[in-house]
Amino acid sequence: MPIHEIQGAAHTSPLLSHTATTRGVVTAVGSDNWYPYDLDIYIQSFTPDQDPRTSEGLHLSSIFNDKSIKIGQVIEVTGLIMEESRQNGMGETTLRLTKSPEILFDGGLVPLPKPRSLKDVPTESISTHSGNLMRKRSLNLSDGVDFWESLEGMRVKTKEIVVSGFRGGGEDFIEISDRFYLNLYVYSKESFSEDLVSQRQGLMPDHPNNDYNPELFVITTNHLSHGIQVQKSNGDYFYYNVGDEFEGEIEGVLTYPRNIFGSGEYALVVPEPQESLQYKNIKSKGFVPFKQRPASTYENVENKLEITATAFNLENLPGNRPDRIDALGAVVAENLKCPDIISLVEIQDNNGISFRESANADLTLKKVLVAVQYRCPNSHYEYVNVDPFEMAEGGQPGGNIRVALMYNKLKLDFKYTGNQSTLGGFTSVLSNGNLSLNPGRVFPLDENFRRSRRSPVMQFSLKAKPEEQIYVIGAHLNSKIGDIDLWGNLQPAVQTSEDSRSGKAQKIYEFASWIERENPEANIIVLGDFNALEEEASMKVLTDNERFMKNMIFTLPPEKRYTTNHNGNSQALDYIFVNNKLYNKPCTDFEVLHLNSDFMGRISDHDPVILKTCF
């Protein structure tokens, strides 16, 4: 049976669950100990048909420990035709071998089939289909997911590659454990269109037009691939950054490895080392020290009626990681320039993900405060915190993450009122505009916040001008984990988590409106990690169609509107909202410091966002 008849012209093989015999030349082979078989093999036919929808490559899974199989051998195989998929993931057509491969023309290797060029990859839509792709009758090569499916298992080539994101390798500034794998999310200038690009040439999603950059693919390291250099001989990492360019042409085999979330990504494996992928041939700056990364343009001047506020997701920062805390202190001082208000998102309890003791984070916050304070001698910081319901507000099991806050006592007055352990920190707005509980939490018992992070709210007054009342609401809305994957088999990919974020945003909006009703002169700041793109529904709830609050991200040019990088897409998830009174001040300004999303050796997986305003 020819390979193209096994693959067919759709996502699902027309011979699914049948047994077939086919032959082809081995294009990639490797041993994978993570699966219950010893060999992964890819083969490709020499006699293609004339249908561009049908792939000429095929994945073989072998339970036979035949280490004699080599690239360039022609083999004949018999096995069961499968689509290896689970949950909402796509399937990769696979022949599960029922007997050991028969090597044809033993003793000789043949030239490999010519690779297919990727210069015509679609750039606008992952899929225009409505329904389950695995039941779709025929591929539409104008859709990204269908285009890649038509090349599944085949040798392909591309050039002028630009790095748009990464995962693994030297991703983190301070490693918990070595990461010997590396995924580089890349695109080719050959297929580049008029897409949104970041200031470092990373691709950006266009949410209103449903464009999530189908031209992105992965160059990966695994048991089949030897292309990307991850570590040097001394164990140090090679560092890749967004905007790095590969010189020369790259050839490999297009695969669809599954990930831990049940879906997968189209990935290029490079079975043999290639000169064009050697680190010395990549236009890269290597590791960029934080002192050379972006720094705030807002100087913290002690005697001016001016404050700066930042929100920074710290990626599950526990109290038992002094190395990470010390690095954070340096970044806050040198890059963020010692802001007056620091919203600390994803602060864990004192012992991290251990299930011992309690949700208390006093030691974590004291260590952060000390690390920042001694580097910011012109500020005097204090922290504000309300512990979460233990084991009930999401995040890493045992970590008890929360949004805490630090503030500069030289510029801001804060008065503790009430018992923060009462009703989970429930607070109300009194008729004089004061919070009944300061700090408190926004409707902590409301069903919208069930099993999720609650939003703290604090009331400050400006020390030099006490009539100026500043209310700060911290946010960390639920993530997109559990949503249908953008590359999954169900299209369009409905983001069910957005409903939950909209409910939470509505409660924050109601509380902010309550503050303004009781104190029309209030200055209101809502800041944090909202886990939503700027055009999503939940973000529009907070602004009430621009009538109430303003999302400061829109004050930036489009190429700067990103705070994180997910699978090669530079996108915004972190924001600062201000009410109209604050927005209309002549000196109100906003910036994003791209410290992490563009660089390997990052301190977090998010960039900090910073607001400046004056009184």
Image: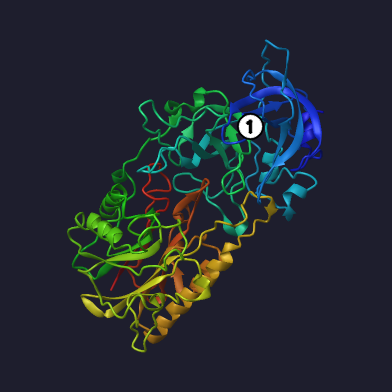
- Above or below: residue 450 compared with residue 345: below
Residue appearing at x 29%, y 48% in the figure: 327
> In the shown orientation, is residue 206 left or right of residue 88?
left
Residue appearing at x 82%, y 28% in the figure: 1
Residue appearing at x 51%, y 61% in the figure: 532
The kind of secondary structure element at disc 1 is loop
Q: Which residue is mark 1?
A: 37
Q: Nearer the viewer, residue 551 or 59?
A: 59
The x and y percentages for residue 471 are: 35, 75
The x and y percentages for residue 136 are: 77, 48
Residue appearing at x 40%, y 67% in the figure: 388
Category of crowding for the residue at label 1, using alpha-carbon neighbours closer than 10 angstroms: few (below 14), some (14–19), many (at least 20): some
Tag 1: residue type? Tyr
The quadrant of the image that shows the C terminus is bottom left
Q: Nearer the viewer, residue 283 or 2?
A: 2
Q: In this orientation, does residue 529 appear? A: yes
Q: Quadrant of residue 578?
A: bottom left
